[in-house]
Image: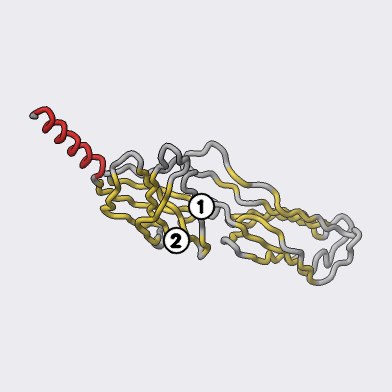
Amino acid sequence: MKGIRNLIVLILLATVLLTCKKKTTIKVTLFNYALGEPITNATIALVERKQGGLFQNDGSCHEIAHATTDANGVCHFDNEKLRNRGVYAYFFGITNAYGIPLDYPCSGTTKGFIEKGKTQDMELNLNEFKASFRVQYNNLLTPSQPGDSLVVTITSPKYQTPGTAFSQGGGGVFYSFPSYADNGYPYNNSILTSIVNTISGKNVIHIRKTKLGVVTFSHDTLKLYPNETKTVTINW
């Protein structure tokens, strides 16, 4: 009888240990490396994922807490009670950023899980959102002389997130080479190109101008936010 009682106690103890919850506190920072700045006023969900059973390959997820990032892209989850059992895992899903509703994977999540029962800092990042621009030329090649030209190139943002080996982006998205006496010369006083698609972030503008025989170079940054369309003005 004593052995049975001890076994029952062990089973009850194991059940308590497996079903108890650990208080966990996390500081979360959300950053956009393509823009080089934190993401403010974004909604982050603390997601509990329960692993599927023997005949269930996919787990099930539900959001147990939410927080909104401040001006520094930071939010806090304090003393969250996380289930200790191994079938439960926890991660953060970003549900809204820049006013755009977002989805996150459930069963497809394989990393970025929260350590239960610890106070910790975590960084999340979102980088590639769609954005667009168009170019407006004013007084293009007026005045000019033979040999004059205007070269304009715009490249997508080039960035690297921590823990990755290679930079992302940096590809050309716009190229223009109007020159004196080409097929379109003389040009209208104002020309507006069609919309060009790129990603939000710090798109880089390079300009090489040969005006009345004098060559000049200039560089600028076209900062685009998600879903934004801007007009790049280039004066001859």
Q: Mark 2 vs mark 1: which is more N-terminal?
A: 2
At x 37%, y 49%, the residue is 48
Pointer 2 local density, CA inside 10 Å: few below 14, some 14–19, many at least 20: many
Location of mark 1 (residue): 126
Q: Nearer the viewer, residue 105 or 112?
A: 105
What's the CA distance linking mark 2 and mark 1?
A: 11 Å
Circles 2 and 1 in contact, beta carbons < 8 Å: yes
Label 2, secondary structure: give it. Answer: loop
The dot on residue 90 is: none
Amino acid type at circle 2 is Ala
Q: Is residue 151 left or right of residue 88?
A: right
Q: Is residue 66 left or right of residue 161?
A: left
What residue is drawn where x is 41% and y is 48%? 123
As displayed, is residue 55 above or below residue 123?
above
Please indicate whether residue 136 sits to the left or right of residue 88 in the image: right
Residue hosting label 2: 42
Q: Residue furthest left?
A: 2
User: Disc 1 residue type?
Assistant: Leu
Look at the image and tell me in which quarter the N terminus lies: top left
Q: Position of residue 132 (x, y in %)?
A: 66, 61
